[in-house]
Structures are given as C-alpha cells and as structure tokens.
Image (spheres, rainbow, N blue to C red):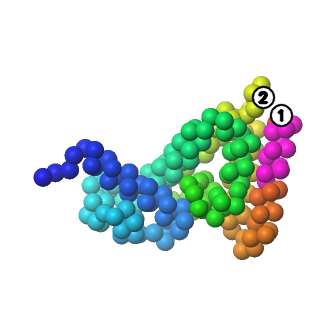
Amino acid sequence: MGWTTEQKQQSREKIVSSAAELFTRDGFDNVGINDVMRHAGLTRGAFYNHFSSKSELYAEAILGAARQAKSRTMEHPENTLSAIIEYYLSDTHRRGEDICCPLAFLTTDIHQRDDNVRSTYTRVLQGFIEIIREAMPEGQKISETEAMHKAVMMIGGLAIARAVNDDGYSEKLLQACREGVQGETAKGR
C-alpha cells in the first residue's frame, strides 16, 4: 500500500528540517544524504522520492530554515526590530541552539554552490532585508539600502562571532554589532 499525500508531505518536511539543522551546523560538504536521512528517521531510498540531488535538498533546506526563522518572528507581532536584533545577535543564536539562520551559518559555503542554491540564498537575503524594513519602529521608514546596512552588519557580525575561538571576544563582537545596528535605528537610519 502506498503512502498518502499527507504522509509524503510529512516525510519531505522531516527531510528538509533535518537537512537544515545538519547543513547549518556542519556545512554542505560535511553532510551526506545518509546523514540527513538517518537524522530524519527515514531510509536513503526515501530521499529520491522527494529530491533529485543533494544540491536540490540544500536549496530547500535553506528555504526551510528561513521559513522557520520567519515563522518564529511572525508568531510574535510584538517583535520589533530591537527584539529581532537582540535575538539574532545573541549568544544562543551564535551557538546554534535554536533555529539557525542560513544567511550567517552558510555564508562562506554558498559561493561554491550551483545557481539554484545561490538564487535561493539571494531570495532569503532579500526576504530578511524586507523583514528589517517592516520591523522598523512606527513612523520610521528606511530605504532598501539602509536595511541592507543593518542586514549585512547582523549577518556578518554573527558569522564572524561564530568563527572566532574566544567566547569572550565573540560576545564583544555581537555586542558591538547590536550597538551598531541599534544606533543606526535610533538615528532613524
């Protein structure tokens, strides 16, 4: 007896969720299809019912991680830009203890991937920039370029804070980024 459409969808979601977690933690080259499927509690054979390649899964995992992060943000409409900045540039996020942002966690890996993966990453980045614009305090509007400044400081700051091997220094970097992005917001930029 075949699987129902709902079971197939649940299986796909498990695979994407597992892949997002593993790829953001370990990177594309360090995660195999077997790793993803084992983590999802499924067999390798099930993979090919959903995806034609690891690269296709990688693009879906980037979107899946971004959707999870956006969903978490949208669940709390009181999430002002300040709250988003505080969480995004937190030690908890740096350590990857919660939903990991593919923009910061995969930034050094993406340029080596195919156009589909890079296109997906670009769309996720554009979405993050739009979230920043929409989360500005009431009465404050910023241009796309100004939102890009904030996004780049947040993504780059988190990526660098993850790269250093000194937790104290890492926290200083995150704090400097929080102050920098918040300072721009306070100035209305």
Whether pointer 2 and pointer 1 mark residues with C-beta atoms closer than 8 Å, the reply is: yes
Q: How many numbered markers are drawn?
A: 2
Front residue (pair 75, 104): 75
Reply yes or no: does residue 185 show up in magenta.
Answer: yes
Which secondary structure dominates the residues rendered in magenta?
helix
Residue 46: x and y, percent?
27, 60
Closer to the N terminus: mark 2 or mark 1? Answer: 2
In the depicted structure, whether residue 176 falls above or below residue 187: below
Front residue (pair 180, 55): 180
Say the numbered circle drawn on residue 188.
1
Q: Which amino acid, mark 2? A: Gln
Residue sitting at the far left: 1
The answer to whether 117 appears left or right of 159 in the picture is left
Residue sitting at the far top: 139
According to the image, label 2 marks what residue? 140
The answer to whether 61 appears left or right of 97 in the picture is left
**Which residue: 83% across, 34% down?**
188
Give the magenta range.
Answer: 177-187
Say the numbered circle drawn on residue 52.
none
**Residue 112 can be seen in this image:** no
**Which residue: 72% across, 40% down?**
81
**Residue 6 can be seen in this image:** yes
- In which image quadrant can residue 187 be found? top right
Reply yes or no: does residue 10 show up in magenta.
Answer: no
